Image: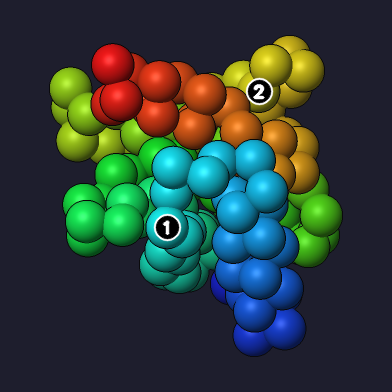
Amino acid sequence: MKAPPPSTKANLTTRLNGHARAHWPSLAGIDIRFRANFAYIDGRYRDGTILKLCRLRYGGSAHLWGFAIYRASHDDYEDSFLPTGTPVGTAEEALDCACGLYLEAFNA
């Protein structure tokens, strides 16, 4: 699969930062790194701490993305299922899943 077009990359960045502001106020923002057809999503705290969250896989749609959770124990990403039971969903669903796991653990 090809990399997402620049318009999809810009849209994803805008959408996820807006979603994080509305739903994950402990984050100062979301940083996204694009490599090939992957988008690597990190959470950024106000003190500058970066927390790796998940990886999205572009499959040709700006609205549906494959999901892989970051595994801190292995420093890698593992294809995973979203709470809906599917491995593909919206970027917002993926962000919520990863933040629900990692922000709660990180803030504990």
Q: Which quarter of the rendered picture does the N terminus lie within? A: bottom right
What residue do we see at 59% from left, 50% from top?
20
Residue 60 in picture, x, y percent from top left: 77, 62
* Observer able to see residue 99: yes
Horizontal placement of 11 versus 74: left or right?
right
Closest to the observer: 88 or 84?
A: 84
Residue sitting at the far bottom: 6
Q: Secondary structure at mark 2?
A: loop
Residue 69 in the image: above or below residue 58 = above
Crowding near the residue tagged with mark 1, few <14, some 14–19, many ≥20 C-alpha atoms within 10 Å:
some
Q: Secondary structure at mark 1?
A: loop
Horizontal placement of 68 versus 7: left or right?
left
Crowding near the residue tagged with mark 2, few <14, some 14–19, many ≥20 C-alpha atoms within 10 Å:
many
* Observer able to see residue 16: no
Residue type of the residue flagged with mark 2: Leu
- Residue at the disc numbered 2: 82
- Residue at the disc numbered 1: 28
Residue 22 in picture, x, y percent from top left: 68, 48
Residue 9 in picture, x, y percent from top left: 62, 75
What residue do we see at 42% from left, 58% from top?
28
The mark lying in front, picked from 1 and 2, is 1
